[in-house]
Amino acid sequence: MSVPREELVTVALGDRSYPIHIGPGLLADLGDRLAPFLKRNRVALVTDRNVADLHLAAAEAALRAAGIACVTQILPPGEQTKNFATLERLLDWLLAEKIERGDLILALGGGVIGDLTGFAAAILRRGVDFAQIPTTLLAQVDSSVGGKTAINSPHGKNLIGAFHQPRIVLADIALLDSLPRRELLAGYAEVVKYGLLGDAAFFDWLEQHGAALCAGDLPARVEAVTQSCRAKAQIVAADEREAGQRALLNLGHTFGHALEQATNYDARLLHGEGVAIGMCLAFALSHAMGLATGQEVERVKRHLSGIGLPVRVADIKGADIDVDTLLAGMAQDKKVADGRINFILPRAIGDSFVTDQVDPDLVRQVLAASLAA
Ligand code: GLY
């Protein structure tokens, strides 16, 4: 297999613009790549136990080789880590380590570590720079890019947070080799999202190369992460704070979050799996409203299920879910405005829009059909 060349995507936000480097083996050059962003040769690195076991030694060695000292905090893995108590401990630790306003904090991990560390960086000393080194496919194509940082509240996911853009994102594609297959597929759902929401040609490409990508094809992985980051960078540059089109990035998420809530955010459903089912529900709803064709609904389902992702509510094992629970979950979504749910709906593959003009009876019918399937 040929080694693909490194790709570069820029998130264009004026003096807060930053590069996303995408390619295999970037971690080995970590120190040299970060050096231009450092005011002194010392960084704080935040990771979790699972990632530390796999990649911390390599990251620390690369920093040492460039003469950069590193203090490290290893947090427990899992969504529960994104809470106030852990944030407080992390901030205390950063202050005890005398991390200064001009220092750089590194987030080495998946979405949980990136979101929590980014939020800590946003509020420590009123804002310290941070770098994202995403280690999951989901983090490489979505959560590490765009500056959304947050922790969870008992009232819901990501409800306490800030927009704080990283200085640099290093997406080392080789790190994906150590991902469990189920997590890789969950991240793949977010890749498919970019095709479905705005790029039909990318969805065509994924239909041809998605299986190889999931099986480990390196050039296909670099291409998919690059296309995804390029799509996200464009949207974020145009609408950093989600006044408009950034909401399109939530295609499948209103349904998906309700499904995650109904399964207690536990191992029965990963976020990306909820998004896969949610995108199928969004297409089914669009079809019921006379927009997407029946063939398109089937095509989306065929691709996702062919890869190994769930596509119906009934595909979630061990879950006892009913339509009313899901509707109640959707009514709590962050995109609810003035009591109305804002839906991200496809008109067709590669063309989506935001609307609050949806007949609740159709939503009920679409959910019931997906539960019964
Ligand atoms: N993950 C959605 C966004 O960054 O806007």
Image (cartoon, helix red, strand yellow):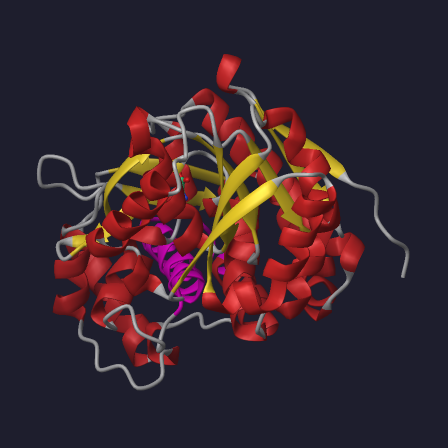
Q: Position of residue 176 (x, y in %)?
A: 64, 61
Please tell me whether residue 125 is drawn above or below residue 92 in the rendered image: above
Q: Depth check: give the residue in front, 12 or 70.
A: 70
Majority secondary structure in the magenta region: helix
Extreme right residue here?
2
Q: Residue at x 41, y 35 (%)?
A: 99
Q: Depth check: give the residue in front, 369 or 228.
A: 228
Q: Position of residue 194 (x, y in %)?
A: 54, 45
Please tell me whether residue 245 is drawn above or below residue 46 in the rendered image: above
- Segment colored magenta: 270-296
Ligand 1: give its quadrant. top left
Q: Is residue 223 left or right of residue 199?
A: right
Q: Position of residue 15 (x, y in %)?
A: 51, 13
Answer yes or no: is residue 185 visible: no
Q: Residue at x 56, y 23 (%)?
A: 39
Residue 272: in magenta span: yes
Q: Position of residue 81 (x, y in %)?
A: 31, 60
Q: Depth check: give the residue in front, 145 or 63.
A: 63
Extreme top residue here?
14
Please tell me whether residue 325 is drawn above or below residue 167 in the rendered image: below
Q: Residue at x 69, y 53 (%)?
A: 61
Residue 329: in magenta span: no
Kindly indicate the quadrant of the structure image that contains residue 260.
bottom left
Q: Is residue 332 left or right of residue 297?
A: left
Q: Quadrant of the N terminus?
A: bottom right
Please tell me whether residue 122 is drawn above or below residue 370 in the rendered image: above
